Amino acid sequence: QVQLVESGGGLVQSGGSLSLSCVASGTIFSIDAMGWYRQAPGKQRELVAVITSDGRTNYADSVKGRFTISRDNAKNTVYLQMNSLKPEDTAVYYCNADLLTIFSRRYLQWGQGTQVTVSS
């Protein structure tokens, strides 16, 4: 059994900052890529940022220069630092992890999501 738990969402004014965390726990052997996605009301879920186990990153154009993804492999944790937030960043943010369990099962696990609301 594997679970991802996000934290750090909330309400912030435009131009403000928030930091999200996501911890993976359970029968994990290894984790490859970890990522953050978001879904705004009435829209499809979209990629925000992804980071590989060796630290390579990729960002959506809409967040480049404002958001920073990082991870602590020893803690099975991925972070998302969000600066200069805009109202259009309002969404439920989900983390995921491409992982291998100790039972040699590989799959993509998602967290339950955390709400980020940016007021204008």
Image (spheres, rainbow, N blue to C red):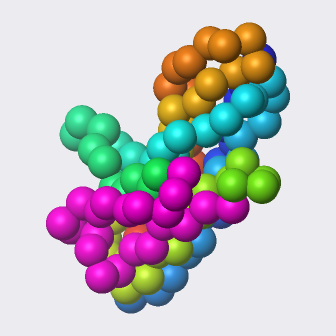
**Left or right of 13 on screen, residue 21:** right
Q: Is residue 25 visible?
A: yes
Residue nearer the viewer, 99 or 116: 99
Residue at 40% x, 74% y is: 67
Q: Name the image quarter holding the C terminus.
A: bottom left
x then y, percent, for residue 54? 52, 57
Residue at 31% x, 60% y is: 58
Would you identify the image quadrant in which residue 49 lies? Answer: bottom left
x then y, percent, for residue 1? 77, 17
Above or below, 38 against 83 in this view is above
Which range is magenta? 53-72
x then y, percent, for residue 59? 30, 62
Residue at 48% x, 44% y is: 33
**Left or right of 15 on screen, residue 110:** right
Above or below, 62 against 51 in this view is below
Q: Is residue 21 visible?
A: no
Is 55 in the magenta?
yes
